[in-house]
Each structure stands twice: as C-alpha cells, then as structure tokens.
Amino acid sequence: MNKRVLHTLEYDKIIQKLTDKTVSKMGKEVSHKLTPYTKIDTIKEKQQETSEAVSMIFKRGSLPLGGIKDIRSALKRLEIGGTLSILELMHIGECLRVCKNVKTYSKATNKNDSIDNTRLITLFEEIDPLGVLYKEIHRCIISEEEIADDASQALYTIRKETARTHDKIKQSLHKIINASSSKTMLQDALITIRNDRYCVPIKQEYRHSFKGMIHDQSASGSTLFIEPIAVVELNNKLKQLETNEKNEIQKILQKLSNFACEHVIVLKSNSNLLTQLDFTFAKAELSIALNATEPIYDGDNYIHIKKARHPLLETSTVVPIDIQLGKSFKTLMITGPNTGGKTVTLKTIGLLTLMGQSGLHIPAFDQSHLTVFDDVFADIGDEQSIEQSLSTFSSHMVNIINILKEATSQSLVLFDELGAGTDPTEGAALAMSILETLRSRGSMTAATTHYSELKVYALSTDNVENACCEFDVQTLKPTYKLLIGIPGKSNAFAISKRLGLPDSIIDDAKELLEHKAVQFEDLITDLEVSKKTVIIEKEKAEQYRKEAEILKDKVSKQKEKLNNQRDKLLRNARDEAYTIVRQAKDDADQIIKRMNKMMKHSATYDHKSLEGERSKLRDKLTDLEQQMSYQPKPKVKTKQPAKIAVGDTIFVHTFNQKGTVLSPPNNKGELQVQLGIMKTSVHLSNISAMKEEKSNLSKPKQVENGKTSFSKAYAISPEVDVRGSTVEEAIGHIDKYLDDAYLSHLPQITVIHGKGTGTLRAAIHTFLKKVKYVKSYRLGSFGEGDSGVTIVFFK
C-alpha cells in the first residue's frame, strides 16, 4: 500500500487514535506500524479478533493491563547471563502480575459469560503467570530501592547487626555530649554525620583537647566535626557491615536473575502475548468509541457501506451516507456544489476501505460490505481544509500519471475535481480519457467534478453511474446526503440569486448558456426532485413496516399473556372445585358410615337398601367430580350492535375479550378498540354489543363455609394510583381500596404515589401502620417504580 495515500486519506490520524487506546509501550509500537493487509483471509482473522474483543469488553469491561512494563531489554540481558537490577526484576514481577490478572479476566464467571470464540481464548490460554517466580520476586523486593530483610538469612543477620552497631554508636556519642568534661568543648549538643561517619561539633579552640578524627569544618571555621576516638572502631564496623550488605544484595539479585533466566522463553512469550492482546483490545476500544461495526468480506468485488460516517468528523454533526460501488457500476461520478460534501464522500470511501483492510471496524451500520484492494490511490486537493490547500494542475497531473502507471483491476482510485485547474474543455476531455482508461482496466473509481460533459459521459457510458451531494437552495446549506443515480447541479444561479445578485445579471448569464445546457440542467433538477421523493417515500415505507412489526409483536405477546392468564384462572377454578367435591364426598362417606354403624343395633332397617343408597350417592358425587374437571368457555350474552358510540362496551370475538370503543367505524367498517392495555382495530363483523348485567357488589353472598364472596373479587386491580391527590383524598381512596383488595384475597397490592417531595408517601406509610390486616410494606425496587410506589403485603 503506497504511503502517500495513507497521509492523503488521513489514515495516520486513525492510527494515532488507535495508539492512544493502547496501554503498553509495545502495544503503541505495534499500533503505530499498522498498515492495511491485502490477503482476505488475514483481514477476516483480524476483523474476527476485533469483534471478539468488543464482545468481551461489553461482557466484562476493559482488559486489565494496568502496570504492564517493557521487559524486552531485561530479557536480552538474561539471555547473555547478566544480573538484573532491582528495577528490572520489579518490572518482570509487574508483568507477571498483569499476566495473572489477564488470565483471571479470561475465565468465565457465570454460564452466560463464557468466551464463544477460539482465537482470543487461544491467546489467553498460552499465557503462563509463573506464580512461583512472581512470589519470589514479590517476597524479596519491596520497592525500587529496597530489598526485604528476609530475602536471605545472611541479609537478615547483617541488617540486625547493623542496627545494633548504630545503637552502640549513638549510646557512646550521647555519653560524650552529656559528659561535663565535654560540654565546654561542644559547639552544639548534637550528633551529626560527615563522610558517612558519626561526628560531634567541637569548637575550634578545643581541636587539640578533644581526641578524635576531624572529618569536616564549618564555613566560618569556628566549628570542627570530629569523630570521637571511642566510636572509630564502631564506625569502621558499620562501614564493613554496609559493604557486606551490598555484597549480599548483589547475591540475591544474581539468584533472582538466574531464576528468571530459567523461564526467559516463557517471559518472552508472555510479553508478546500481552502486546498482541493490548493491540487487539485497543482496536476494540476504538470500535466502541466510533460506534463501529465489523464489515463483511465475502469475496465479491463490490462496496456497499450503509450509513457510513467519516471517523474524524464530530459524531453529533456528521451526516451518514449510503455508498455503493462495484456491483452494477465500477465508476462513480459525484457532482454538486462546493462545500456540499463531495470530497468528504471520497475520503469516507477510501478511509473506511483502509480501516477495514487493517482489521479495524468501520463507522457504519451492520452488514456493510467491503472488498479487498491490492492498492488504493487518491488525488485529492481540498478547498475545505480537510487536508491541505489546492495543488496546481501540474502537481495533480504528475500524481495522476503515477496512478495510471500502477493502478490495476484490483485497485481503488479516487479523484477530487478531476481535470480542474486548466481550460474547462480540455480538462473535461482529459478527465473522460483518464476515467475511460481506468474503466477499461476494471479499476474501481470514484471522482468528483463540476463538468457537465462528465455528467453526460456517466449517463451514456456502461458501468459508470452519476451521484450528487444534495444541496438546499432555500437555506444555501448542503444536506451532505449522497444520492446515487442522478447527476447534481452546481446551483450557481440559485445561490447567487439567494445571496442578492440582481435578476437582470442572472438572466443575462442564462442567455449566454446554450439552450441544450439549460435543458440538461432542468432535467437534472427534475431527476433530483424525483429521486428525493422516492427516497423519502421509501424511508416512510420502511418506518411503517418496522412499526407494523413492533405492533404485531406486541399483539402476539399480549394475546399469549391473555391466554396464559385464562388458562391459569381455569386451573385455579378446577382445583377449587375439586377440593369442594372431594370434601363433600368425604363428608358424605363419614355420614353414611355413621348411619351404618347406628343401624347395626336396629333390625327394623334394611341394611342392603341403605348400602345401595350409599353407593348411589357416591356415584352421583363421582359424576359431579368428573364434570368439574372441565369447564367450557362461558357463553357471553351478546347481540348485534344497532348503533356504535365512543365509550360503548363491546365484546371482541377474535380476542374473546371485552373492549371499549375509542372511535366510530370508518368507511371500511373498522373501529379503534381499547382491550386492556392494548389498542387495536377490529371490524364490525367481529364485535357484538354486551348485555348489561346488574352488579352484585353491594350484596354479599353467603356460602356454606361461612365465607363472604364478592363479585368484585374477580375484577379488583392489583394497584391503585393516587398521584395528584391531596393527602385526605388519597387516604380515603386507599382505605376503601385496601378493604376490597383484602376481601378479594389478593396477596399484595401496589400503591402508586409518585416521588415528589415525599409528603404523600410518608402519610400513606403512617396510615398503613394502623391497618390491622396489613402484614408489611416496602418501597418498590428497580423495575417496580423505585420510591414512587409502595408494595403492600396482606396477612
């Protein structure tokens, strides 16, 4: 891949973004060297790695690479038998710690968090944390400048002896400075260190009276720092102990280095694996930042990018475009006014191609197609400051000549303002000849232009297609949308008129144009309007289709929910009926047994007849039990509606449910109906008027077991909404509702009071504490309404 195009299409800026996502120095080096691949199998592998890393980040978060160090130089020293420093060994220990964290990261924490790929898991499995080496380094080394006392027995002994020697020296010096004979000679009663030896400050005039070795004097010369003769031996011993400590530390470092050298191959492999993972997860982080997706490479030689976005433009302002090239045409001629987005379109095509072939995801919709090119060429001189200032015609032509020498049937070629910078007639002729040369080779080409001759060339030549960047003449602003299939207008007259140029000048300019040119521009305008209309209608149709799919899915789920609720009610009814029959049967058996027992003592009763009656009674009860095991659907009393009005209650046969009319029937006989939480359209032929039934809510019915049954028990709602009510209104409403809910045997209910200032919630909680049949209550959790609702449980 030629280096010039990487800079022209701003690929280097994408690489910088990628480099910023890496953690390690090694990962940054790999990212900085990344260039597009040209083999489709390699590209697919790299794309798959990026996708797998994205999936892992979404499941488990970012890869824990914090603290990773560059240990390559240390490993080279180990290979030649060198001894590593404390810092180098610490870096190896840090890398092993990162290996352990990465290894833990790769292991699934639950069944839904498993790695469903083979490429990344292979890298994770090859990492060896070398636990024994890590523990030994961690045990011996405390910091970059300190070795632990227990790194070896000898070091422990030396440091312990050093501490005792320090104490002895200090004790001796304290005796000297506290002695009455020395106080007059001391400049200050303190202990100091000069040349790594303990000294005391003595006045100049007592230099011959105080026995010891002079190590330093003050700037004025009035004070001498003398090592007392009593501590000279102890200071000598201390210096020897320091030497012994350094020698022992060197032995420890040598031992650790030898231990690490035994695992140098594994250490080098770990470093390479961490570098590769750092690079791969950096690609994934960039994909997430750009809201990018994996492009499809299926071997077909075409480009179809859906809702492509230039990755270097602001996400909030960039306008997505659909790009097609290579399937039904291999040359795309893009026209339109300046600042309309033509150059950005070219760069988007080229840059996304380079990103895809580098194993990077592209900022576009899913299922976008790319193809593999052996090279990409671009001759772009921007006036919009996207890259640089305009080049001269000569420099453009030099670049074009080089492109024509190297472009093949597997190349992508991009031209910005092809043929510009010279006489328009000659420039247009050159441009057509260049495009025809590339077309004959089979190269995939996209070019921008203002020349009408090139628009005609695209209209009249096979395998060449026009496109335009849409421009709103009313607002003088480009929409940046790419319309493939029609040529664009430069809109010079319209823009000039909008900016205030006199009509007379514009009319004179139009007269100077050839009649055919005017007709051609008018044709372009008509095509643009027609294309825009078709696109708008297509987008509306797609939106309606998606809404219909969503509505269909909602209806299906609601229907399934209703069926489940109905089946549950039927099962509960059967269970209750079975319990009643079973109890009645047992009671009857007990009664008859007692009667038989009583009859044994009386000869006047016919025992066989009595036993026969008992059998008949049991048979009847058995038949009743069988009948109760199935309950047919209740027949709803219906009649054909004579007149439909909004608010009427009707029965919808297709849903087997009551509903409320929301709108009168239209000319097709369809009307809107509310079915619970669902709104739907039904035909008049599928509905019937409901026969009003008198309510029995006010008259409780006594049953044999002494319990009271209310008809409202089957219609009571499990929640009550008091938002917007005053405290008095809410408490009164909740008081009545709790009675109904408790008599309906609801296990719990929900009170919706909203969040607000919390006054209403506090008043409701105070009231609930006083209700005897309330077992407990709590605020709603996440998904239930949080602190805006209270869940109440009955005893």
Image: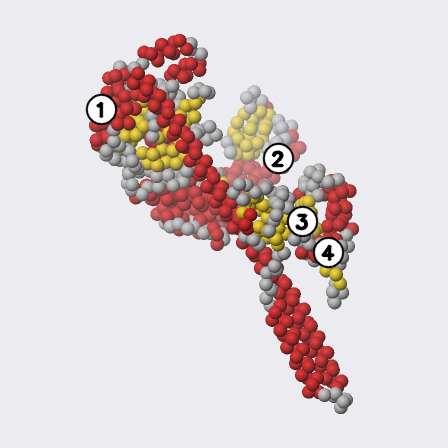
Pick whichever, 772 or 130, lies toward us.
772
How far apart are the alpha carbons under marks 2 and 1? Answer: 105 Å
Amino acid type shown at disc 3: Glu
Q: Is residue 519 above or below residue 232?
A: above
Of the pair 14 and 209, the residue shown nearer to us: 14
In the image, which is nearer the foreground, mark 4 or mark 3?
4
Q: Earlier in the sequence, mark 2 or mark 4?
A: 2
Q: Is residue 237 above or below residue 5?
A: below
Q: Residue 43: where, in percent of width, then height?
A: 32, 41
Q: Residue furthest bottom?
A: 603
First-in-chain label (2 vs 1): 2
Is 461 drawn above or below residue 47 in the view shown?
A: above
Mark 3 is surrounded, within 10 Å at the Cα level, by few (under 14), some (14 to 19) or many (20 or more) other residues, namely: some
Rounded to the nearest angstrom, the CA distance separating label 3 from label 2 is 90 Å
Q: Which residue is mark 4?
A: 696
* Label pair 4/1, CB-CB below 8 angstroms: no
Residue at 67% x, 78% y is 617
User: Which three-letter amino acid code belongs to the residue tagged 1?
Assistant: Ser
Q: Which residue is mark 1?
A: 433
Residue carrying label 2: 176
Q: Which residue is mark 3?
A: 719
